[in-house]
Image (tube, rainbow, N blue to C red):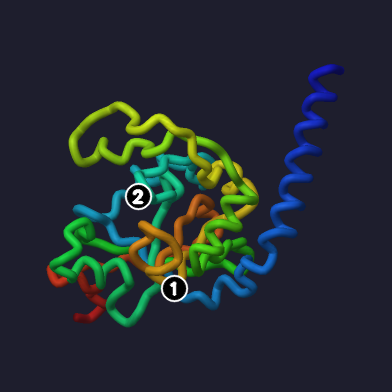
Amino acid sequence: MKLEINTLKRIIKEEMRRVISENELGGMIHPSPSEIGLQVFATKRGPFNRKRLEQSLIKGRVPVYSKPMGSTDKPYPAFWTSTLKDTTTGWLDLCRDPDFWEAKAGDEAVIYEILPSAKILVMDSQEDYNKIKKAYSKQTPQGGVDMQMMFGGSHIMGGNMIDVVDWSKLSKDYDAIYCSSNSCYTGWDVESIAWWNLNVLKEIDIVDISKECRLITKGE
């Protein structure tokens, strides 16, 4: 009986948190997700590995958590897409930018349709990010693991605790977060959507990516 009562309390607490967050962020939920446009997932190397993707999911969802990198606060891991624009996307545009060495593209890209049932949170500005952080806040050591990628270290930089978005909790209430431009928040370099619920995406096609970081449409 004690376990049942504790379980009930947890469910009530989670539901109250969800209702409160929706009241605070209700105006940031995209009213018509499918109108955002077709989404493109570009591999960073080689062809699309469906088996690897499916093995990383739990019932079609990405187990996301908070992993801040310096001043950047993004969900980690996540399934990242960018909106299709003719034969390119925001990410592929960066791939063609010689000054942006981090952007890379592999051999294939997957095109998805967003289902109408998708619940997407829109982040257009620093102010939006602050609202999200207020509604879903957690503390983590300052600096996170931001030097790990560059120098191969494994220790956490800094010692002060800072507030970041609790992406794990947010992912229970929303399917994705949509950064509509390259100015939505520090470290989000381009228009993109970070997904953790892939059940609201419908695969349309798989196309090749040219050496010039453009999508090769059928018949080319």
Q: Is residue 120 above or below residue 76?
A: below
Quick check: 67 left or right of 33?
A: left
| Label 1 to label 2: alpha-carbon separation | 19 Å
Q: Is residue 63 above or below residue 27?
A: above
Q: Mark 1 points at which residue?
A: 38
Query: Residue at horizontal 84%, vertical 24%?
Result: 5
Q: Count residues near mark 1 (Cα–Cα under 10 Å), then give few for <14, some for 14-19, many for 20+.
A: some
Quick check: 55 left or right of 109?
A: right
Q: Mark 2 points at which residue?
A: 50
Q: Which quadrant is home to the C terminus?
A: bottom left
Q: Is residue 141 above or below residue 70?
A: above
**Tag shown at residue 206:** none
Quick check: 151 left or right of 183?
A: left
**Which amino acid, by three-letter code, is at mark 1?**
Leu
Query: Where does the image place residue 15, in percent across and percent down from the top left?
Result: 77, 44
Q: Which of 215 and 127 is in front in this view?
A: 127
Query: Where does the image place residue 185, in percent across and percent down from the top left?
Result: 43, 61
Query: Where does the image place residue 128, in percent across and percent down from the top left?
Result: 56, 63
**Which amino acid, by three-letter code, is at mark 2?**
Arg
Q: Nearer the viewer, residue 182 or 2?
A: 182
Query: Residue at horizontal 38%, vertical 46%?
Result: 53
Q: Is residue 220 above or below residue 80?
A: below
Query: Where does the image place residue 194, in percent across and percent down from the top left?
Result: 45, 57
Q: Which quadrant is home to the N terminus?
A: top right
